[in-house]
Image (cartoon, helix red, strand yellow):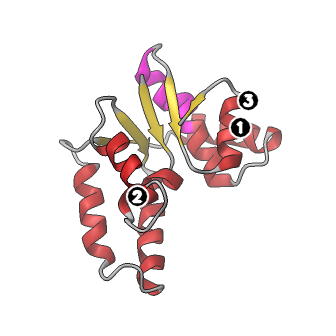
Amino acid sequence: MLRYVDTSALVRCYFADEPDHGELRSLLLDGAEPVVTSELTRLELASAAHAAHRAGRLPDPAELLAVVDADCGEDGPIALLRLQPEVVFELAAALVAQHPLRSLDALHLAVARSTAADLAAGEPVVLVTRDHRQAAAAAALGMAVE
């Protein structure tokens, strides 16, 4: 099994005041199964960190992003998958036509269905998300969701 983590779940993993923080840290950072996400996630996490800083929830976004970068580095528990626009954009466009998804949620689901599925080589890809619409779309496509 390969876990594909969406930003909605990964944010909760890094922000201690978010629901499911401990559970997601254990699952994604300390779990035995491999975890992947799109390179888009780094930008989304940067946006979340700076928004949290502006709201007074996070003293130093650079500190948190350094931890994220280490966790997504060569020896980290999360692998970043390169975006393959020639495959992913077409699939994401089809997903937004079929399901009530926001564009980035559709892109993540498209990466999970294409690049991550190729990497899994026939093993199941499980989507880890906290976005209900994305979870419903993944389930409709036959994907397991955590």
Could you tell me the amino acid type at mark 2? Answer: Arg
Q: Residue furthest top?
A: 122
Numbered circle sitting on residue 42: 2
Q: Which residue is mark 1?
A: 137
Which type of secondary structure does the marked residue at label 3 adopt? Answer: helix
In this view of the protein, which residue sits in the foreground, 76 or 30?
Answer: 30
**x, y percent for residue 99:** 78, 42
Q: Residue furthest left?
A: 75
**Residue under the point 53% across and 37% down:** 146
- The local crowd at label 3, few if under 14, some if 14 to 19, many if 20 or more residues have their Cα within 10 Å, is few
Name the side, left or right, on which 15 lies relative to 84: left
- Callout 1 touching callout 3 (CB < 8 Å): yes
**Residue under the point 30% across and 44% down:** 29
Could you tell me the amino acid type at mark 1? Answer: Ala
Predominant SS along the magenta part: helix
Q: Which residues are magenta?
A: 111-121
Residue 7 is a magenta residue: no
- The local crowd at label 1, few if under 14, some if 14 to 19, many if 20 or more residues have their Cα within 10 Å, is many
Which type of secondary structure does the marked residue at label 2 adopt? Answer: helix
Alpha-carbon distance for marks 1 and 3? Answer: 5 Å
Which type of secondary structure does the marked residue at label 1 adopt? Answer: helix
Could you tell me the amino acid type at mark 3? Answer: Ala
**Residue under the point 81% across and 42% down:** 97
Alpha-carbon distance for marks 2 and 1? Answer: 23 Å
Quadrant in which the N terminus is drawn:
top left
Q: Which residue is mark 3?
A: 140
Asked whether the viewer can see residue 138, the reply is yes
Name the side, left or right, on which 72 lies relative to 142: left
**x, y percent for residue 16:** 37, 65
